[in-house]
Image (cartoon, rainbow, N blue to C red):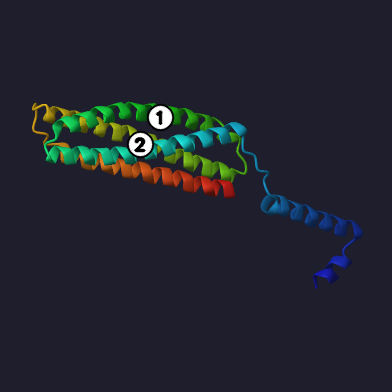
Amino acid sequence: MFSTFYFKLPRQARILILFLIIILAAFFVLRFLAVEPRNIPQDFLRARQEASLIAQDIVVFSNESSKRIEEVSRLDEERKYTEALVLISAELERNKQAREKAIELSGQLEIMAKNLAQISPSAAGQKALEALSSETALISRLIIYNDYLTQLLEILREKFLGRNEGDKIQELLGKANDEARAINDLNGKFNEVMRAFDAE
């Protein structure tokens, strides 16, 4: 029916209709089927690699730190205060190193953030932003973790020196362990989102 109607139209009208159909088809192809070229700035890729390595170091640190705190708790129960104090001193030093790692990580995340606008396709940019959010939250949790850890270690040291009863030890230990788990989870999410980013 359409073809009969179409051929009854004047030649110029048929050309105009054909032209409009071609324009609409081209728009459809460009809008829905054409693949946006993939562009990932080299600075973003380098910073991503560095951020991933630093975050992994932070996860290892928090896991090892949790184990050492459990060891300190065991030494406390066994009243081996001298050994516990040695472990605490070492852990306070490692805590400073963890803060330095957090500063390094934030520097790499800043580089990644500065390059977000240049990432295409836009879906990849959204994934990159989601990954950045996870690592930013990781830094926040690491700061909280370090604060709990410092408080815990100071209370333990005071207890071992006979200056307090150490009544907040279990509470702080629980909070520090919760933050360590959150750090692990956030780093896992970062890696998962970056795998999706690579697939975009």
User: Dot 1, crowdedness within 10 Å: few (<14), some or many (≥20)?
Assistant: many
CA–CA distance in space, label 2 to label 1:
10 Å
For disc 2, the marked residue is 61
Q: Which amino acid does label 1 sit on?
A: Lys
In the displayed structure image, the side of residue 181 where residue 31 appears, left or right: right
For disc 1, the marked residue is 101
Q: Position of residue 40 (x, y in %)?
A: 62, 38
Q: Position of residue 41 (x, y in %)?
A: 62, 34
- Disc number at residue 137? none
Q: Position of residue 16 (x, y in %)?
A: 84, 55
Q: Which of the two labelled residues, at mark 2 and mark 1, occupies the earlier sequence position?
A: 2
In the displayed structure image, the side of residue 41 where residue 56 appears, left or right: left
Vertically, is 19 above or below 91?
Answer: below
Q: Where is residue 13 in the image (x, y as percent from the top left)?
A: 86, 58
Q: Residue at x 29, y 35 (%)?
A: 145
Q: Which amino acid does label 2 sit on?
A: Phe
Q: Residue at x 38, y 34 (%)?
A: 139
Q: Residue at x 26, y 38 (%)?
A: 68
Viewer-nearest residue: 2 or 165: 165
Occupied quadrant, residue 3: bottom right
User: Dot 2, crowdedness within 10 Å: few (<14), some or many (≥20)?
Assistant: some
Q: What element carries label 2?
A: helix
